[in-house]
Image: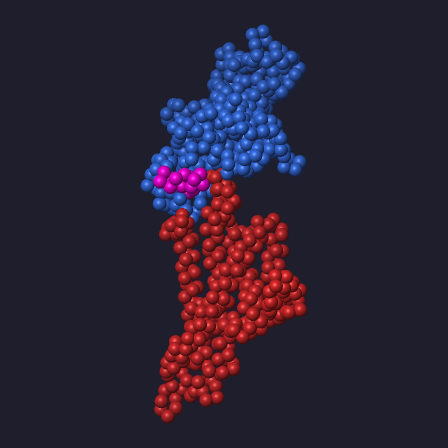
Chain colours: A blue, B red
Amino acid sequence: MALLEIQNVTRRFGDFTAVDKVSIGIESGEFFTLLGPSGCGKTTLLRMIAGFDLPDGGRILLNGEDLAGRPPEQRPVRTVFQSYALFPHMTVEGNVAFPLQMAKTPAVDIPAKIAAALEDVRLQGFGKRYPHELSGGQKQRVAIGRALVTHPTVLLLDEPLAALDAKLREEMQLELINLQKEVGITFVYVTHDQTEALALSHRIAVMNKGRVEQLDEPSRIYGFPRTRFVADFIGQCNLFSGPVASRGSEGTITLDVPALGPVRIATDSKLSPGRPGTIALRPEKIRIRATSGDGADNHFRGTVADLLYLGDVTVYRIATAGGVRIEALLANSQSGSAKFFEVGDAVDLSWAVDAGHFIEE
Amino acid sequence: MSGPPLLYLLLFFAIPSLIMVLASFRSPGEFGGLAPFLEDGKVDLNLDSYARFFTDPVYAQIFLKSVWYALLTTLFCLALAYPLAALIAKSPQRYRDLLLLLVILPFWSNFLIRVYAWMIILGPNAALARSVNGALAWFGHEPVPLLFSSFAVLVCLVYVHLPFMVLPLYANLEKHDQALLDAAQDLGANAWQRFWRITFPLSLPGVYAGAALVFIPALGIFAIPDILGGPGDSLIGNVIKQQFLETRDWPFGSVLSIVLTVAALALAGLAAWIGRRNLGAPSSAKQARA
């Protein structure tokens, strides 16, 4: 049995089902992320683990024990709030000491534990400061140190980096990974930021409309999205939908995509001809060339409709003859040359049969 | 500060105060009021009235009793207003305005009428006195009068000043961030600990503001002891009123007023100082942690 078992948990608010029969098992020492757009139920689920909200159905077990009867203050679970929620009338030390005092830690042991917690979050020497004297990143560290000082079984993090600027966010992501490795505490992380989820997590549960759409490792979530929603939500993705035209012999399917034509895809799906399917194709898997390509499996011609120069890469949007827009990405690895193509250039698109991922619908 | 604010302060505070200070150094007139300032080439300026205040212990006693009554009023108001203000602050938004309106509703009727109403409520034939004395008789105790007593004065003082405590407390509590209480609970604090460690320390500015708004007017009040008090319930406000209107000893009345003003200013200053210290200034940590 997993450390934290979420079994068939449902939560309704009036007619709205915020969390719909969700079952997740989170292992000890795992960095687990609940990822989804706002309103998908991820924060409601987190609040139910913390005890601020109770499920209408299902159970939440920690170490095999049902948490239903325990109020938040009696759960071995700590939360890092999005707003940090530092106590403004206490110093950093006072904030970190608070959970120790609540746990009736002997007063003689408290200073050493505070020092250790502040060292964990790299805030030595900040103990006497007040929250209003700290930067956003420092406040974030205090909130994490305060939550970790009593060594909870599970640490819940509710979009903890959302209020930080991009550069600091990246820095804090690396620190969170290291911190989690160091303390070995199970992290349950809530975010709507897919790059953050991919960067931090051991496993991700992608949530939509109260349900878990896919629960997998980051590389599998990105490479093998199980639903249209996951493919669309995680990163950029071209989605080609249409009925199955034919099934090839060596584990391929040909999809008849309206306005584009037949697209071949490698899959072990046994979908019979006529049934609808979708191909998810990442922009970086597409080859763009000026001249007609060799014998690639999938092959289309089009013109550059617009492009987005992002520095390291350029995103091209190609309009095919039938009017389908395909997004392709080219790394600007050649120094000096900013772009390979201009708007209006005729280009040739191709990708291998195993470049995309087939989704049954 | 300049322009209209300065003019206001000059007109309504500085000049009247100055007149009072001058009056306190003069002699009472033969038929009340003030003796002539210049008579037979002699200027009438002396410390007689101050000497009287500081030598006759009865005035200091009354003054201390007034401070005591004002202090009790403040504490009872705080005890009653805190739960009420917290309740209003926690109510759904659509009820808050109505509840606040109910708090200030008494201001719509005349102050004296409200004080006289207590004469009826506390009167010997009213339900309250009957039930209290009925209960006392049960235990073989002599009946006690509720009206014309320190009890009546204190009850009415608390009643009249309660809104002045509720409003600043509400204004403070209403701004509290629920996330802080959630965090405290998450970190292991039960309801009692959440109140004493988070809500109460953060509400101190509201407590000090309310305490100042109750304590200072309660210190100088004279109508309530006049109407509801017994013979021994005269407060400093009554003595001042008596000096000006009945004895017509204006210099001594001025001395008493000045002592009252200085005491009120000193206490207000103290409250403001403590309040500032607790607004998250770096020196307030010791108190919050204690």
Q: A192 or A253, which lies in front?
A: A192
Q: Position of residue B245 (x, y in %)?
A: 52, 81
Give the total number of marks visible in the rendering: 0
Q: Position of residue A245 (x, y in %)?
A: 63, 13
Establish if A344 lies above or below B252: above
User: Which residue is found at the position 63% from the left and 69% from the top?
Assistant: B123
Residue farthest top in this picture: A249
Q: B273 or A348, which lies in front?
A: B273
Q: Position of residue A318 (x, y in %)?
A: 53, 24
Left or right, B197 with reference to A251 = left
Is A312 one of the magenta-colored residues? Answer: no
User: Which residue is found at the position 37% from the left and 92% from the top?
Assistant: B40
Q: Is there any visible trace of residue B3 in the rendered image? A: no
Left or right, A145 with reference to A353 = left
Residue farthest front in this picture: B140
Boundaries of the magenta span: A95-110
User: Which residue is found at the position 62% from the left and 16% from the top?
Assistant: A256
Q: Quadrant of the C terminus of chain A?
A: top right
Left or right, B125 with reference to B18 = right
User: Which residue is found at the position 37% from the left and 82% from the top?
Assistant: B46
Q: B72 or A32, which lies in front?
A: B72
Q: Main secondary structure of the magenta part?
A: helix
In terms of image quadrants, where is residue A333?
top left
Is A102 one of the magenta-colored residues? Answer: yes
Q: Position of residue B153 (x, y in %)?
A: 55, 68
Q: Is there any visible trace of residue A151 in the rendered image? A: yes
Establish if B268 lies above or below B20: above
Residue farthest bottom in this picture: B40
